[in-house]
Image (cartoon, rainbow, N blue to C red):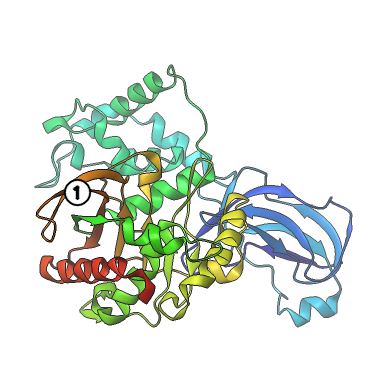
């Protein structure tokens, strides 16, 4: 019987790969159409890969704990000729290999590694690319083989011309690392690392102000269930961005692209990383309805199974690092976000009361905003923060 491939689907707008965490059926099982056969983990959640048709599960080509890009063939189903024709698969598709999977060309890699380093040492180095900034094709190939980002090789001391890092230097460095305690990074940690590396390609700036938490704490006593400070912050940010939409715009080429809707994420700490469930059109949602929605998102985030409505890309997000006892921080917005706002640890501080003519104790915390400086300037960010302070000072208006 003809075979139909099980393909790694596009699991989200910004998701390029996923790691196989579980095979939910066995080879030889009779499979129904659209049946879940593989669980994969992305930087957002655990998701399912389903079958394109019914038939007999012929084989799995994917392996558990291996990472595969979108479009990879994960297995095959023995199917009817009618299904093959329906799915337009008369010719076998090209199999996309994982970045560092079994289909890597080991022969060419061996040839590369066995070449004489002395020849590479005498090659001319391009102008302006001396030292660790220059990586030879052989070194780049070795980095790719090991799954190491080129930036991570910048710490290797070079012995080549003008301090260039040779393959010998790199192999000696790796040999030293192998003698140190280590463990395999989780898919979540690798996803966070990739997001932060891509975010850091932009010029980011941070500013901060002190705010009073007392209006928030007083107002939350009037609501059941009570919203946490992060929800007040997210709601105020959403309203402010609806009034200043250019503060959430993105620079794409030579265009400033405004957001279609005010979708705000709230960072949630999970095992070995962070997940950011997103509140759609938060500027239009009542504050009183957010705690129930947040509780649902929080539970699903802990299980790495966000509901579909929480997976959309946010234009901005908030994080409450004050829960860790941290007063001030410079959080980094995700690649699809223009800014991120953080709230620090609340503490009693002396505040000058003009009416009483004396200092009085007031519960305060630091509010920070980190933003893409290509899109937002100091004045614009300052006005945005001032508006957020006004909204948090009168939370009944949220």
**Outermost residue, top direction?**
179
Q: Quadrant of the N terminus?
A: bottom right
For the point 36% across and 47% down, which residue is it? 321
Q: Position of residue 213 (x, y in %)?
A: 31, 55
Q: Nearer the viewer, residue 299 or 39?
A: 299
Residue on which the image places disc 1: 360
Q: Quadrant of the C terminus?
A: bottom left
For the point 53% across and 64% down, which residue is it? 291
Q: Is residue 201 visible?
A: no
Rendered position, 231 above or below 286:
above
Rendered position, 368 above or below 251:
above
Rendered position, 209 above or below 145:
below
Q: Is residue 1 left or right of residue 71?
A: right
Q: Nearer the viewer, residue 158 or 230?
A: 230
For the point 23% across and 32% down, which residue is it? 165
Mark 1 burial class by Cα count in 10 Å: few <14, some 14-19, many 20+: few
Q: Is residue 141 visible?
A: yes
Q: Is residue 89 left or right of residue 58?
A: left
């Amino acid at each position: 019987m003809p075979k139909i491939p099980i393909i790694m689907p596009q699991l989200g707008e910004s998701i390029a790969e996923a790691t196989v965490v579980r095979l939910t059926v066995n080879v030889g099982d009779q499979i129904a159409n659209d049946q879940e056969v593989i669980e994969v983990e992305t930087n957002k959640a655990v998701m399912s890969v389903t079958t394109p048709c019914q038939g007999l599960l012929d084989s799995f080509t994917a392996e558990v704990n291996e990472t595969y890009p979108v479009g990879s063939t994960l297995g095959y189903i023995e199917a009817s000729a009618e299904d093959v024709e329906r799915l337009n698969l008369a010719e076998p598709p090209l199999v996309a290999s994982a970045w560092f999977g079994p289909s890597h060309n080991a022969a060419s890699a061996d040839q590369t590694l066995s070449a004489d380093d002395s020849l590479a040492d005498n090659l001319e180095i391009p102008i302006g690319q001396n030292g660790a900034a220059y990586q030879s094709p052989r070194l780049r190939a070795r980095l790719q083989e090991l799954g190491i980002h080129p930036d991570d090789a910048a710490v290797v001391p070079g012995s080549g011309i003008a301090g260039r890092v040779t393959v010998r230097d790199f192999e000696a460095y790796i040999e030293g690392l192998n003698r140190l305690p280590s463990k395999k990074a989780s898919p979540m940690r690798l996803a966070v690392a990739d997001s932060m590396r891509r975010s850091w390609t932009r010029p980011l700036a941070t500013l901060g102000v002190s705010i009073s938490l007392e209006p928030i704490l007083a107002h939350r006593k009037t609501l059941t269930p009570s919203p946490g400070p992060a929800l007040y912050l997210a709601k105020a940010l959403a309203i402010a961005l609806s009034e200043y939409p250019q503060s959430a715009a993105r620079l794409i080429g030579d265009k400033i692209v405004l957001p279609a809707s005010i979708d705000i994420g709230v960072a949630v700490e999970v095992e070995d990383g962070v997940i950011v469930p997103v509140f759609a059109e938060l500027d239009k949602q009542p504050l009183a309805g957010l705690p129930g929605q947040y509780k649902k998102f929080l539970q699903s985030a802990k299980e790495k199974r966000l509901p579909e409505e929480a997976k959309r890309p946010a234009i901005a997000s908030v994080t409450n690092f004050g829960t860790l006892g941290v007063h001030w921080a410079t959080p980094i917005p995700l690649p699809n976000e223009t800014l991120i706002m953080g709230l620090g640890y609340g503490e009693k501080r002396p505040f000058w009361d003009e009416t009483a003519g004396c200092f009085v104790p007031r519960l305060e915390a630091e509010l920070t905003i980190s933003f893409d400086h290509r899109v937002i300037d100091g004045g614009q960010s300052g006005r945005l923060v001032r508006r957020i302070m006004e909204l948090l000072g009168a939370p009944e208006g949220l």
